Amino acid sequence: MRYIDSGTRDPHHALGHWLNAELSGNIIGLRIQSGFYSGEAFAPFRQSFASLSDNGNPVRIVLGSNDGETLASHLRELVTELQLPKPNASLGVVYYQNAYYHPKTYHFLRADGSQTAYVGSANFTLPGVTARHVEAGIILDSRNGDALEVLDQIAQATDQWFENSAAGFERVASMADVGHLLDAGIIRATPLPRPPRPSGAGGQPSQRPRLNQLVTFNNQVPPPAVGAQVQWQALPTELRTPPYPPYIFFAPDAEGPTVGPSALTNNGLGDAAGLIVKLNRDNDRHWRGAKGTANVSIPVSTAATIRFGVFGDRNRPRAEFDFFIRYATDGLTISGQPSKTGLMSFGFTPGDVGHGDLRLVIPAAPIRTMQQTLQTQQRPIPKAEDLALLEWPTPTTPTFKMTFIDQQSALGQATRQIWNQAAANEQLASRGACWLPSDFSPKW
């Protein structure tokens, strides 16, 4: 038996670290009970769950919809990925009028007959799995001498919901069942608005420490739907580890940075066209006339789209692209001259500075020209906390495109609405970015 507690802020004490390690092994059975659930927590493990179900292994999941907070779209995704209805796969929702369904248990059966389980506080939500919330629990493993009798009881506690059909339990075996729960008010179509945090003296928000995720995942998502003339076939890649993490892909035999089409794996960003980026004092420096290099920090969940080469004496992963930049306001677009950019990873090789992050360079020349034009026309200059659109390279257009926005314009207000909704639903791609919906950015 092992105790884990993410209050230590040790990534090895995050539920997601244990889940990732176990699902990488030879698992032939999965059972989960969770009081709260979000599709963002399921995304990193989607393929593992789908493979278990597809291979005829038992997959049984019971989820709470406490206060009716579970989203219909998240349940539909589970129905699809588990290929319900199937005799070996079961999904259920528990809802009470005056109480919560609140267990958090995760049980795995291995091919060698051994069992392991987590019992603790972490819900199957992104903050729970990644330990942005402080969570604690115990891990039992029959390989380490923990009693099979107890592990069997943990598995049976999940099974009994499907066998006994207790009051408050709803079996979900089809899209029609999801629709029934939605009509009955047991689940929701849209997230509940989050209440404001309590205010401090003078009505100001209380200033308290903030916590970050302890583990991150490379959420590889299906490529977007594209025309028949576009082939999204993945290009050859190789993993070169250590010291690089497994989400950094390299072009085979690359002796320098990859460029343009050769820098793409041809994996897409799913239904996203790129990122909405919140500017900060690093990447707004050219607009302020400050010296230095301006960089946008890129979420590592996008890394699977890039085939890197190597660059410099530190052998940093680097990919280079053409870069188009513009400024948009109501009725007017100002374009900068075409330029170049590089996407580079820092901090993995010995002696390299950085925190294992990805950074995209924002070139100075086009911004300085546009800044002079905006000053002449007395228009707002982009600054820290403003939002900008960063469109991702594709096989048909292997370039980065960035749109800086007048925040008071119609486009600026619509962009802010998307950001606020993503933040409220805890669906930001990173601390400084959220996903850019397809067809949102104005045509170039």
Image: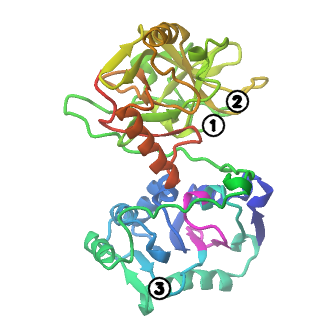
Indicate the amino acid at tag 1. Pro
Q: Is residue 274 left or right of residue 195?
A: left
Indicate the amino acid at tag 3. Tyr
Q: Is residue 239 left or right of residue 208?
A: left
Identify the residue position indicated by label 1 in the image.
Answer: 245
Label 2 vs label 3: CA separation?
49 Å
Which residue shows up at 77% across the image and 53% down it?
10
- Per the image, is 120 magenta? yes
Quarter location, residue 415: top left
Q: Which one is in front in this view, the residue at disc 2 or the one at disc 3?
A: 3
- Per the image, is 146 magenta? no
Q: Quadrant of the N terminus?
A: bottom right
Q: Nearer the viewer, residue 241 or 194?
A: 194
- Residue 319 in percent (x, y) is at 52, 20
Magenta region, residue range = 105-127
Element type at mark 2: loop
- Residue 393 in percent (x, y) is at 39, 25
- The reply to whether discs 3 and 1 touch (Cβ–Cβ < 8 Å) is no
Identify the residue position indicated by label 3 in the image.
Answer: 96
Sequence-wise first label, 2 or 3: 3
The correct choice, above or below, for 254 with respect to 156 in the image is: above
- Residue 191 in percent (x, y) is at 43, 62
Element type at mark 1: loop
